[in-house]
Each structure stands twice: as C-alpha cells, then as structure tokens.
Image (cartoon, helix red, strand yellow):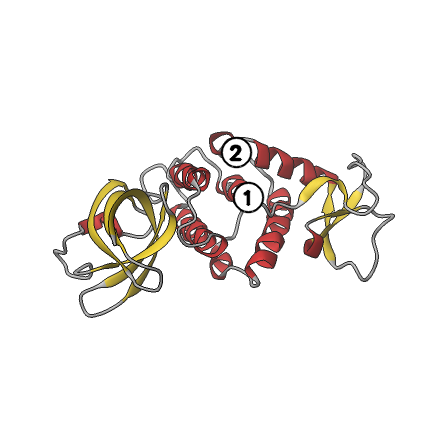
Amino acid sequence: MSLEKANAIVIRQADFSESSRVITFFSREFGKFSALAKGAKRLKGPFDAALDLLSEGRIVFIRRPAGVLNLLTEARLTTRFQPQQPGISDGLLRMYAGCYVAELLNGLTEDFDAAPEIFDLATALLLGLSTPECHVSALIIHFELSLLQLTGVLPDLSGCAVCGGSVEPSGRYVHWVSQGGLLCQNCRREEYSGSSVSTGAVEILRRLTGGTTDLAGRVRLTPAQAEECHRLAVSAVSHILGRRPQTLRYLQFSSHH
C-alpha cells in the first residue's frame, strides 16, 4: 500500500453502503482508477462538493494491491463543472455532453494507465462546455476524435484503405468501421459494411482532430455537418466499446449548438 496524490476528474459514482460511495476518477498522474469514499453520502460528509460528477479536484488516496479497492482519504475541489449558468441557453445539452465525456473516459481507458494528454483534453473540453461562446457539437466531435487518436484507434482519414488513393474533393466515401479507414467508390463492396461520408465531412473531421479544443469550440457546424461527422465518430467509438454509448440518446445537436 502507498499514499498517493493526484489531480483528478470524477467520472462515475456508485453507492457502496448507506453512507459511502465508490468513486471512479480519471487523473493526470495515474489515469483511471476507483476508490472507496467513506461518508461521501452524508449531508455534511468529509469531501463536500469535490466528489460531484465531473468535478475536478486534488485528491489523496491509499493505493492498494490489484483486486482490492483503493481508499480515498482527502478530496479538495479545484474546478466545478458549470454548464448551466447565465448566458448559456443550452445548459442541459452541455450537461449531457459532459456525462457522455465521462462515459467515454470510463470505457476507452484502462485502470492505472497514466495518460496526461487525455486528462488535459478532458479538462479543456469541460471548460469549453462551461463557456457560452463554444459550440457543443464541434467540441464533442473534437473530443471523440482526439480521444480515439490518443488511444491509438483513430480511423485513417488520409485516403482509401484498399487502393491507397487520396481523398478527392468531389468523391464519396464509406467509413469501413471494422478496418478503421475509408473506402472509395471503386473499392466499395457489399461485404465491406460501413456508412457513407462526404469529402466535406472528411475535411471537417481532419480539422477537428488536429486543432486545439479552444479552436474546435469556435467552429459552427450546420446540423447536417454535425450529424454526418458525429455519426462517423460514434461508429468508431462504438466499434471499440463493443456497444453504443448509453448517454448518446440525450445528445441532439441543432443549428445553434
């Protein structure tokens, strides 16, 4: 056993007893892990608001051997997730988007696999969702693609996965989900399952992957662009997870998002 300190985001909560909860964190120093928070369910518990979903804080915990639940000893709130505040008209959508981010962090990462770039991506994304000027659809697509890139499973959007031909401005392509790439019209076959994607969407996806979260939040997408780009990202995410994320049902992007 060892006493550890970390900067962490709360990505999941589960009841453990009448007074305690098991909290799943995503930390900069250790990646994802769970810890028992004794007394967390009490009205005046020892951790206060530091354990609210998507809160960022400084925590101290006792790390125990594999198979034994870690024990949280201290938690101090540093940043509260605030998607619903004056100036934000779509606060509920932003709250759902934050829950979606938490689900992806929990599903696409491994326990105690440190990934500071993913932690920084998540904190920047949550800040963007709390900023009225940032557009939710572009932020979420940027997060999906960047997370896939950082975990090494981003689809190859540079050209056709079969013939190697580059993406043509007037072409139509198919996202070949199982192989993580694109298929041009000439290489498309019935046995290669996938959904159509336009060259314009491919270009938007490239830009949202390569840019920063701040820049992505300034991109205003039409509903059709958001739907097409989000569909490709979700199909890639779902393939890795082995299921569609549960929180997707609440994410409905309209023209002002």
Q: Earlier in the sequence, mark 2 or mark 1?
A: 1
Counting from the top left corner in percent of width and height, residue 142 is at 54, 40
Question: In the rendered picture of this protein, how many numbered marks are placed on residues?
Answer: 2
Please, what secondary structure does the residue beneath circle 1 have?
A: helix
Name the mark on residue 141.
1
Q: Nearer the viewer, residue 220 or 111?
A: 111
- Say whether residue 140 is left or right of residue 112: right
Counting from the top left corner in percent of width and height, residue 9 is at 34, 46
Picture residue at 39% right of the left edge, 41% below the top: 126
- Say whether residue 177 is left or right of residue 12: right
Callout 2–callout 1 Cβ contact below 8 Å = yes
- The picture quadrant where one finds residue 235 is bottom right
Q: Is residue 249 above or below residue 28?
A: below
Q: Nearer the viewer, residue 73 or 105?
A: 73
Counting from the top left corner in percent of width and height, residue 156 is at 68, 43
Name the mark on residue 26.
none
Q: Residues within 10 Å of mark 2 (few under 14, many from 20)?
A: many
* Quadrant including the N terminus: bottom left
Picture residue at 45% right of the left edge, 51% below the top: 105
Q: Residues within 10 Å of mark 1 (few under 14, many from 20)?
A: many
What residue does disc 2 label?
216
Q: Which amino acid type is marked by label 2?
A: Ala
- Say whether residue 42 is left or right of residue 116: left
Counting from the top left corner in percent of width and height, residue 169 is at 78, 34
Picture residue at 25% right of the left edge, 62% below the top: 21
Please, what secondary structure does the residue beneath circle 2 have?
A: helix
